[in-house]
Amino acid sequence: MRITDDVIRDLLPLYAAGEASAATRELVETYLADRPDLAAEAAEAKEFLLPSLEARAPSPDLERRALAETQKRLRRRTHSLPFAILFSTLPFSFYVIDGQFHWLFWPKLAIVGSILLAVGLAFWIVYLVHDRRLRLKGF
């Protein structure tokens, strides 16, 4: 098999990144020794095309922050559920006087009942959003 400049150019990204096998590295270096113009391209590729990526260690407080965020989401989900239930059922509250059934908010205070339902809906949305986010994380 004949090795051409195009074959070496195809191998340059692997060579520049240091991911080529020892045999490939030796082949590229041998070929570049005879071709100074292609060697300049290889040097440029090492410097500019593939900058070295240093492995960064996670920050020391990563676990603590992750735990705090999870606890915050669990708290929000836990606290939003009773309020969602309360504000959703409160407009349907009733009382009985002398055997007569009376709605607490309907029809006299229909606006207040509607506001309570809207607040209940908002708490249900908060609950479901936090529940969904926690379920994606396995909680």
Image (tube, helix red, strand yellow):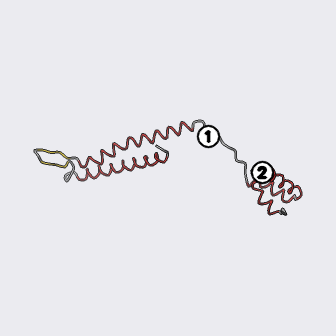
Q: Are marks 2 and 1 in contact (CB under 8 Å)?
A: no
Q: In which quarter of the image is residue 38?
A: bottom right
**Residue lying furthest front:** 1
Q: Name the residue under label 2.
A: 21
N-terminal label among 2 and 1 = 2
Q: Position of residue 36 (x, y in %)?
A: 87, 58
Q: 62 above or below 18?
A: above
Q: Where residue 58 is drawn, which disc sits there?
A: 1
Between disc 2 and disc 1, the foreground one is 2
Q: Residue 107 carries which label?
A: none
Residue 136 in percent (x, y) is at 48, 48
Mark 1: amino acid: Pro
Looking at this view, name the residue that lies furthest to the left: 98
Q: Identify the residue at horizontal 33%, vertical 46% (top origin).
A: 84
Instruction: Determine whether the residue tagged by mark 2 lies in a helix, strand or loop.
Output: loop
Q: Is residue 78 left or right of residue 31?
A: left
Q: Which residue is at the far right? A: 34
| Left-right relation of 113 to 125 | left
Q: Position of residue 121 (x, y in %)?
A: 34, 51
* Quarter of the rendering occupied by the N terminus: bottom right
Give the alpha-carbon distance from disc 2 to disc 1, as whole Å. Answer: 29 Å
Name the secondary structure under disc 1. loop
Hey, what amino acid is under mark 2? Answer: Ser
Q: How crowded is mark 1: few (under 14 residues within 10 Å), some or many (20 or more)?
A: few
Residue 123: % across, % down = 36, 47
